[in-house]
Amino acid sequence: MAKILYILTIICCFSLNNAAKCINQDPCTCKLDDYTWVDIGKIRPSEGNFFQDGLNGVLYFFSGCNNTDFNGKDYKGLFGFNKTITGVSLVKCISSIVPLNVTGYPAINETCTAIGDAKHIEFNWNENPTTHETEFDIVYMNTTATNNSLPSIRLICDSVNRTDLKILSTDTDALVLYSSQVCLQHMEHESMSGGAIFCTILFVTAFVYFIGGALIMYFMRGARGAEVIPNFDFWVALPGLMKDGMIFILSGCRPFAVSTAETYDRI
């Protein structure tokens, strides 16, 4: 019984750990569990097909979690790029000054490159140490950027009913998106999840095992002190057994790697 309880505890810990991972459902959605998720599929620019922001001659255009055709003629900030890039989620444009053109005036040369494909979006998440709120990033895992970085966009939940794209770094292609559409969503539920039910059963079983076992040991077997704990010898030996198990695994599961009294008895 004690060994079974020990195994159930380990399984419960792994279940809780896995429940905290963000599972990518598709380029638009990432789920923490059956009742909590983030969905950026409803993000839509108010004008044109892309959100945009510029800094020091660098412009970024973001269409969301779906690929869109990018046409430079549609954007007033671009003067020298008139081509169309088909099927793209994130575009980076760099402006440079050409010394003189035929009219005698400096000309602006624009170079636009697709650096993000929606089908390669992956979600990352972490907890903000200051606010203790969950923050999400979307990362484009198929980088074609010249600096070999992975373009990323931090998703910031903003109660204001608008969406703004801002640049954090043009060197690493790091952006931030403020929107009420990127907030963590929750679905109310009355029943407990499978993991919660399992852990509840585990803790009730542990309570019955230790308290019931202690009462039996005390009243029926006359045990006193620490000996009222059920399977006392097993729990005392548990740290040593865990250590031997780790040594056994790290040594490549060799049968004679663990030198204990039990080993000598078998020999």
Image (cartoon, rainbow, N blue to C red):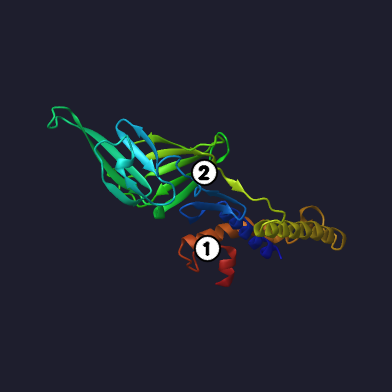
* Amino acid bearing label 1: Val
Residue at 50%, 62% in the rendered image: 249
**Residue positioned most to the right:** 219
Of the residues tagged 2 and 1, which is closer to the observer? Answer: 2
Residue beneath disc 2: 126
Residue beneath disc 1: 258
Residue at 50%, 69% in the rendered image: 255
Residue at 30%, 41% in the rendered image: 73
Around disc 2, counting alpha carbons within 10 Å, would you say few (fewer than 14), some (14 to 19), or many (20 or more)? few
Measuring from the top left, give residue 243's x and y in whole percent: 56, 57
| Element on which disc 1 rests | loop
**In this rendering, would 180 be left or right of 232?**
left
Residue at 53%, 59% in the rendered image: 246
Measuring from the top left, give residue 68's x and y in whole percent: 38, 50
Tag shown at residue 216 = none
Check contact, mark 2 vs mark 1: CB within 8 A: no
Instruction: Please state, as top left, top right, bottom left or bottom right, where the C terminus lies in the image.
Output: bottom right
- In depth, the one of 52 and 157 nearer the eye is 52
